[in-house]
């Protein structure tokens, strides 16, 4: 079961209007970071995202010490919190090219039926 609270849902309501702007008003903030502590919930959100094509994305592809380009700099070291962050951080698209319908679909994806 998702563990969002009413405060998060209220904060996400900003996403529906004020933060986004419109196509004629580009915003400097193009992605809204979202920390989902339960990895299974994050995976489920990403599955629904792929089905509906909503543009949610994992924030990081991998922990920095596991990225091949940097791996040699971290030999013999492990950073479990960095790995955990890659599994819990998602971003929502909030650019001015989202349609009102896109925003509603993303917001509906984030709202828990028990909080409606």
Image (spheres, rainbow, N blue to C red):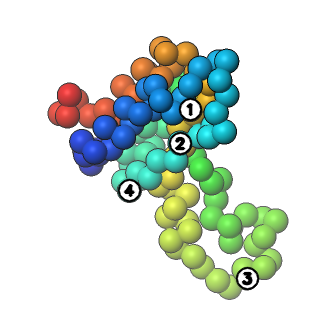
Q: CA–CA distance between discs 2 and 3?
A: 33 Å
The reply to whether callout 3 and callout 1 are in contact (CB within 8 Å) is: no
- Position of the N terminus, as image quadrant, is top left
Q: Residue at x 49, y 37 (%)?
A: 46
Query: Which label's residue is closer to the chain start, 2 or 4?
Result: 2
Judged by depth in the image, the label closer to the viewer, 2 or 3, is 2
Judged by depth in the image, the label closer to the viewer, 2 or 4, is 2
Residue 100's place in the image compared with 59, above or below, is above
Query: Which label's residue is closer to the chain start, 2 or 1?
Result: 2
The dot on residue 32 is 2
Q: CA–CA distance between discs 2 and 1?
A: 6 Å
Q: Secondary structure at mark 1?
A: loop
Q: Residue at x 65, y 23 (%)?
A: 25
The reply to whether callout 3 and callout 4 are in contact (CB within 8 Å) is: no
* Along the line of sight, the residue nearer the viewer: 97 or 86: 97
The dot on residue 10 is none
The reply to whether callout 2 and callout 1 are in contact (CB within 8 Å) is: yes
User: Hey, which quadrant is residue 105 in on the image?
Assistant: top left
Residue that carries the numbered disc 1 in the rendered image: 94
Q: Position of residue 13 (x, y in %)?
A: 37, 32
Q: CA–CA distance between discs 1 and 4?
A: 21 Å
């Amino acid at each position: 079961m998702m563990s969002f609270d009413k405060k998060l849902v209220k904060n996400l309501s900003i996403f529906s209007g004020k933060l986004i702007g419109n196509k004629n008003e580009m915003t400097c903030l193009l992605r809204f970071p979202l920390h989902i502590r339960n990895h299974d919930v994050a995976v489920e959100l990403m599955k629904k995202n792929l089905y509906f094509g909503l543009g949610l994305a994992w924030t990081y592809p991998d922990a920095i010490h596991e990225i091949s380009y940097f791996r040699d700099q971290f030999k013999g070291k492990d950073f479990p919190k960095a790995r955990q962050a890659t599994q819990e951080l998602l971003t929502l698209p909030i650019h001015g090219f989202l349609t009102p319908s896109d925003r509603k679909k993303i917001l509906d994806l984030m709202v828990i039926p028990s909080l409606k």
